[in-house]
Image: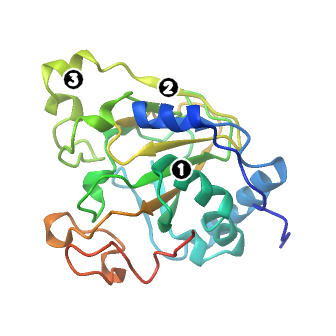
Amino acid sequence: MDTTLFQGTYDVPDDKVTFFQDNGYVRFDEVLSTDEVEAMRAALERALNERKGYSRDLAGGGDKILQMLNLWEQDDVFKDYSTSPRLAHIAKRLTGSDTVHLFHDQALVKKPGPSAASPWHQDQPYWPSKESGMLSCWMALDDVTVDRGAMQFIPGSHKWGEFEPISFEGDGPALKDLVSEEQEALWKPVPVELKAGDCTWHHGLTFHYTRPNTTDHTRRAIVTIYIPEGITYAAEDKMDHPLSDTITSQKGEPLRGTKFLQLA
């Protein structure tokens, strides 16, 4: 493997931190080089062929929204990426935390044709954390348009509190049905189209959504989720998570686990 991949830093100016704090999401351009994107694409292709570890269709079957967890355990390219000090530095800047741990990484793949929408949802309800504050980096490995499934956000929605988890199979209430009239009046989605190597970061409470991929090209993204300081384990107060068995904390203790690597 090329040991120069994912080295170096990425500048995070104060205005980006302020934007994230105000809106609950932020974009960064050219975080990965062309060579790094190509290495990630090759690693994902290996993972798709081998299907090791945890893999499922979030939409209920047929790989409409393929999710593959903890690819860093399967491939050195993903390990170097997901544990990269470059990304850890961005996570620290956005949260103001002195330390961050990796919660997990995941590939999210939407193929042409059978793809489904990822419904409006928050991430926090699906996580075993009591407090909000965890955040995700959504890295594009392909140029992403709205029609290909670009991320869309409701600015400021991370300040609205935590709502019930939303079914990705369409068998429950929509998130928009759960908000107040005042919040519905602020429901103004912002799509963020990206080039390969660009990324968005979003707070665990930020409302977000992606359309089905209606193009002729696959949409590949890698998500890395980070735990800053001040996040504790909610235990039975939250829904079960695929990594629940790896958690070593007791309820109310800092959220830690055998796979939650300290990055900074």
Residue 32 falls left or right of residue 214: right
Residue 96, placed above or below residue 196: below
Residue type highlighted by circle 1:
Cys
Instruction: Determine crowd level at label 1: few under 14, some 14-19, many 20+ residues with C-alpha closer than 10 A.
Output: many
Residue 78, placed above or below residue 179: below
Residue on which disc 3 sits: 183
Return the x and y of residue 142 as percentages of the image width and height: 68, 42
Return the x and y of residue 14 as percentages of the image width and height: 58, 36
Residue on which disc 1 sits: 137
Camera sees residue 226: yes
Return the x and y of residue 222 as percentages of the image width and height: 58, 54
Query: Which quadrant is home to the C terminus?
Result: bottom right
Instruction: Determine crowd level at label 3: few under 14, some 14-19, many 20+ residues with C-alpha closer than 10 A.
Output: some
Q: Secondary structure at mark 1?
A: strand
Q: Which mark is residue 262?
A: none
Q: Secondary structure at mark 3?
A: helix
Q: Nearer the viewer, mark 2 or mark 3?
A: 3
Q: Nearer the viewer, mark 2 or mark 1?
A: 1
Residue type highlighted by circle 3:
Gln
- Tag 3 near tag 1, CB within 8 Å: no
